[in-house]
Image (cartoon, helix red, strand yellow):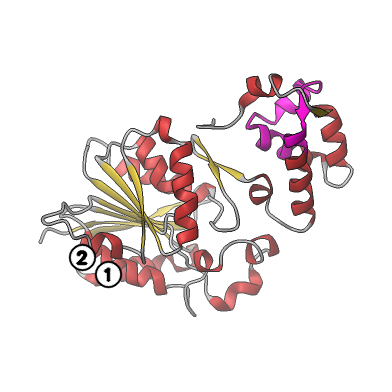
Amino acid sequence: MSSGGSGAEEVRDAGTATAASVAELFASLSGRLSPETATEIISALYDVPKSWVKLEPNAPVDDVMHERAMRAMDMISRGAPLQYAVGTAAFRALTLDVDERVLIPRPETELLVDIVLEMRRGRSGGIAVDVGTGSGCIALSLGAEGNFDRVIGTDVSLDAIAVARQNAGRCAAVLNAPVEFMHGSLLSPVLSSPAPHAPRPCLVVSNPPYIALSEASQLPANVRDWEPFPALFSGGEGMDVTRQLIRQAGEALDDGGILALEVDARRASLAAELVAQDGRFENVAMRLDLTGRERFVVANRQER
């Protein structure tokens, strides 16, 4: 599954400084956490299937891995999400570094990549821009699975850009197109490009923040208290960033270019209405997530 994880073979060849076996590590973790969570920690740290934990109980655990597991146990005991505790998150075919500087990639966002790739079927080349890239999950997946000349990820957070660039290095071997990350708000880094006659993007894709400030108390504690505020919240109604992004996408996209947004299911119709009212888009549609909720809005830039 990974583009840079340790893998089962490396576990068997772990260093000679052994603190415990996998079975002993599992027992230690299970003393404070559920067996399921203990299994998830070990499988995530070693980047192997969860079944491996039971199949290889005698595999050695070196001191470094033991310390990472203890640290993960402590973080989860304090309410941290599993992904932050182990420092990685799975996204499609990639394993990415994540921490409190970036949003944890969600399964819904994996589906957004599927939608984009389907809309791009039969096309090749062009520039894709992932706005609010965070960990770089969308940009790197498009670089690995898409057929683009270039992929750009933008983020207003320098911390997020640092994480995304780290993940670009981690995933370099599986990328089919160059992926770069630029600091700035939404599409500003692309719109302000000094290059004369620079080609317009053929795709703008984003999972922007879309939670209203008044809804903070409704979020699970491991989201509200751990994930970065700017990646979650977008003004009093949750639509400020989406509204601004739609305007910028109309300016930036090439004729026929794709706009693809992940949105709050409660506000999908409002997001679609904003795209339609902009006047520069056609083929505006909402797409459903795996639970049947209206979760995505897509459109094409009209010809100028």
Which residue is at a point 41% across and 74% down the rendered structure image? Answer: 240
| Quarter where residue 100 is shown | bottom right
Quadrant for the N terminus, please: top right
Asked whether residue 135 is in view, the answer is: no
Q: Is residue 186 above or below residue 43?
A: below
Left or right, 250 with reference to 133: left
Residue position for label 1: 247
Q: Give the amino acid at mark 2.
A: Glu
Tags 1 and 2 touching, CB below 8 Å = yes
Residue 42 location in percent, x, y? 73, 35
SS label for mark 1: helix
Which residue is at a point 77% across and 36% down the rendered structure image? Answer: 66
Q: Is residue 237 above or below residue 89?
A: below
Asked whether residue 245 is in view, the answer is: yes
Give the residues in magenta: 40-66
Quadrant for the C terminus, please: bottom left
Q: Nearer the viewer, residue 231 or 112?
A: 231
Q: Is 48 one of the magenta-colored residues?
A: yes
Which residue is at a point 59% across and 74% down the rendered structure image? Answer: 215
| Quarter where residue 294 is shown | bottom left
Q: Is 39 one of the magenta-colored residues?
A: no
Residue position for label 2: 251
Left or right, 175 with reference to 194: right
Left or right, 9 with reference to 195: right
For disc 1, the neighbor class at 10 Å (few under 14, some 14 to 19, many from 20) is some
Residue 147 location in percent, x, y? 28, 36
Q: Nearer the viewer, residue 102 or 115?
A: 102
The CA span between labels 1 and 2 is: 7 Å
Which residue is at a point 75% across and 52% down the rendered structure image? Answer: 76
Q: Give the amino acid at mark 1.
A: Arg
Residue 12 location in percent, x, y? 70, 19
Q: Residue furthest front?
A: 17
